[in-house]
Amino acid sequence: MCIRSLEADIDRDILKINGREVQEPVVVTFPGPDGWPLQKLFNADPANPGKHKQIDITVNNTLL
């Protein structure tokens, strides 16, 4: 899948890729405070607690 746009909001439990809401379980890793990553499982499925797809978001601090 080619990601052209990504909307991920931990507080509002929103995950959209290319303008479409993601329906399957996905773990997203965000940059967190003091270098510690934050992870959020979107669309958790209690019936299938196994492996999930994963998206890792990184930020290059030298550009900020």
Image (cartoon, helix red, strand yellow):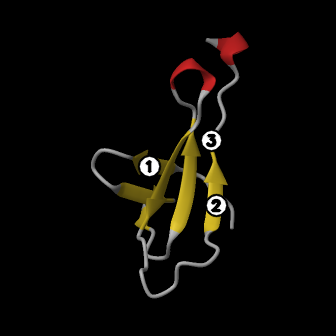
Q: Quadrant of the C terminus?
A: top right
Label 2's element?
strand
Disc number at residue 38? none
| Alpha-carbon span between mark 1 and mark 2 | 15 Å
How busy is the neighbourhood of tag 2: few (under 14 within 10 Å), some, or many (20 plus)?
A: some
Question: What amino acid type should be assigned to the residue bearing mark 2?
Answer: Gln
Question: What amino acid type should be assigned to the residue bearing mark 1?
Answer: Glu
Question: What amino acid type should be assigned to the residue bearing mark 3?
Answer: Ile
- Viewer-proximal residue, 62 or 44? 44
Side (left or right) of 11 relative to 7: left
How far across and down, in percent of the image, does residue 30 sit? 55, 39
Q: Which residue is found at the position 42% from the left and 72% from the top?
A: 44
How far across and down, in percent of the image, does residue 14 sit? 35, 56
Report which residue position mark 3 lands on: 57
Residue 34 image-quadrant placement = top right
Q: Classify 41 as above or below 10.
A: below
Question: Which comes before the other along the chain, label 1 or label 2?
Answer: 1
Q: Classify 13 as above or below 53.
A: above
Report which residue position mark 2 lands on: 54
Question: Which comes before the other along the chain, label 3 or label 1?
Answer: 1
Side (left or right) of 53 relative to 48: right
Report which residue position mark 1 lands on: 7
How far across and down, in percent of the image, does residue 29 sit? 58, 46
Q: Which residue is found at the position 49% from the left and 76% from the top?
A: 24
Find the residue positioned furthest to the left: 12
How far across and down, in percent of the image, does residue 18 sit? 51, 59
- Viewer-proximal residue, 35 or 54? 35
Label 1's element?
strand
Q: Classify 10 as above or below 20.
A: above
Q: Which residue is found at the position 58% from the left and 36% from the top?
A: 37
